[in-house]
Image: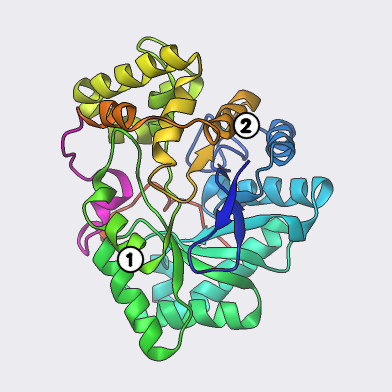
Amino acid sequence: MQYTKLGNSGLNISRICMGCMGFGEPGNGQHSWTVDEAHSREIIKKGLELGVNFFDTAIAYQGGTSEQYLGRAIRDIAKRDDVVIATKFLPRANEEMEAGITGQQHIERMLDKSLLNLGMDYVDLYIYHMWDYNTPLYDIMEGLSNAVKSGKTRYIGISNCFAYQLAQANALAEKEGFAKFVSVQGHYNLIFREEEREMAQLCREKNIAMTPYSPLAGGRLSRRSGETSKRLQEDSYAHLKYDATAGQDGIIIDHVAQLADKYGVSMTEISLAWLLTKVTAPVVGATKLRHIEGAVKAVELTLTADELAFLEESYVPHHLVGVMAQNTPAAAKDKHVWSVGSQKI
């Protein structure tokens, strides 16, 4: 395993982050394809053995049971100071706004609930899961800064935002003396590269870590045509994001398969080896031991400039999908994938 600093933070992280969205009670949240606690623990243990020290979860994942599974596993298997734990919070619910709960109060409530789920006194990285158009940015940044001052989180990050929003937030933080975002978790992989338009340049200039989710496009970049899995069959949200462009994306996926054959490695290793040339640490979901094993192997694989170009040459611009397609004031009023039953406290 290789390690690096998480942007401008003091956190030393593995180049692979284990994404824990696939851990949790099936039916207790958005997904039917998640794995139970026993299997989650096996995967976490294997990741630790392979050198993974960076774990990403969220209060929204499977009604908080993802946080609970991760917290119990870390307590029993690892030393807390040896790992980097990230979790996320959602915007205020309508019920909270109607009850007069402020943005700062909401952040404190969400973080306290996540710490309870995790069984921890602090997290290393607390992530603003998606842009909240109903809460003043000042309240968000002050609330997050207060969380850092309280010692409940060491650093803060952001997810699912535009580059201008990240720049605006950090500019406000600098002006007011608040904590700044040290990382951004966006949607980025070989078949969805829209983060390269502006976000990647901003992060390079400001030393903000990119820790993208969906690095394998819900499994599409790890399997050949015709191969399937429980997630590929049942993940309706991934179908929403990727099915419309399956034809043009298939060319890139075929190129991944060709290079995998050339090297005698998995498609996972090729896809992640490419992404590792662009970002700090991809957030790789794992529901089987081989998933994390393949992800770790990718760290040691170096592709040539010609091979990188071969993987990139067929890409065409994509429309925004998923959470980022809802990153507008109007769309934010609608129910999104994480909005149902995910932040009850």
| Whether residue 277 is situated above or below residue 290 in the rendered picture | below
Q: Residue at x 36, y 33 (%)?
A: 238
User: Does dot 2 land on a helix, a strand or a loop?
Assistant: loop
Name the residue that disc number 1 marks.
Answer: 205
Q: Amino acid at mark 2?
A: Val
- Residue 35: mark in rendering: 2
Residues marked 2 and 1 touching at CB (< 8 Å):
no
Percent x, y of residue 299: 54, 36
Q: Is residue 110 left or right of residue 73?
A: left
User: Does dot 1 land on a helix, a strand or a loop?
Assistant: helix
| Whether residue 160 is situated above or below residue 9 in the rendered picture | above
Q: Is residue 172 left or right of residue 41?
A: left
Which image quarter is the C terminus in?
bottom right
> Magenta stretch: dominant SS?
loop
10 Å crowding of disc 1: few (<14), some (14-19), many (20+) = few
Instruction: Name the mark nearer the viewer: 2 or 1.
Output: 1
